[in-house]
Image (cartoon, rainbow, N blue to C red):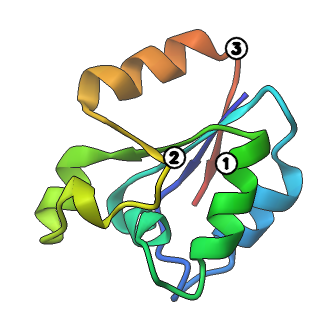
Amino acid sequence: MLHTVNKSPFMSNNLDSCLQMAKKGSAILLFEDGVFAALKGTAHADKVSAANAETPVYVLGPDLAARGFSEDAVIDGVKVVDYAGFVDLAVEHDKVQAWV
């Protein structure tokens, strides 16, 4: 399953809910304001890093750039994807759970 999170973890508990439900073998994509969860040095960085050890975490690069961040600001191990990468993730996984 591909889990998508589009809300900032500073404004919503969607990320926490997603991390609790994501099982090994699934993937997590952070997009829109969800990209704030992928940033180094935030209050959420440790839990995203820990989740990434079991479940791959991706972040949408164009949404990072739209919010003024470069790939250098992303937590080590979190993979940056473009729109084609987003589509590839959706195709690779049999279901998509949107945490909106």
Q: What residue type is labelled 2?
A: Gly
Q: Which amino acid does label 3 sit on?
A: Asp
| Mark 1–mark 2 CB contact (< 8 Å) | yes
Whether 33 is drawn above or below 9: the answer is: above
The image quadrant that residue 56 belongs to is top right
Q: What residue type is labelled 1?
A: Asn
Give coordinates of residue 71: x percent, y percent: 24, 54
Instruction: Tell me how far mark 1 sits from mark 2, CA to CA.
Output: 7 Å
Read off the residue under disc 1: 52
Whether 4 is drawn above or below 64: the answer is: above
Q: Is residue 76 left or right of residue 81?
A: right
The residue located at (51%, 46%) in the rendering is 77
Whether 31 is drawn above or below 3: the answer is: below
The residue located at (50%, 69%) in the rendering is 37
Give coordinates of residue 73: x percent, y percent: 29, 66
- Discs 3/1, front: 1
Which comes before the other along the chain, label 3 or label 1?
A: 1
Placement of the N terminus among the 4 image quadrants: top right
The image quadrant that residue 99 belongs to is bottom right
Give coordinates of residue 14: x percent, y percent: 66, 69
Give coordinates of residue 36: x percent, y percent: 40, 72
Read off the residue under disc 3: 94
Disc 3 is placed on an element classified as loop
| Mark 3–mark 1 CB contact (< 8 Å) | no
Read off the residue under disc 2: 77
For the residue pair 32 and 58, the one nearer the viewer reads as 58
For the residue pair 52 and 66, the one nearer the viewer reads as 52
Q: Is residue 82 left or right of residue 32?
A: left
Instruction: Tell me how far mark 3 sits from mark 1, CA to CA.
Output: 20 Å
Instruction: Tell me how far mark 3 sits from mark 2, CA to CA.
Output: 24 Å
Which comes before the other along the chain, label 3 or label 2?
A: 2
Q: In this view, does 30 lie to the left or right of 94?
A: left
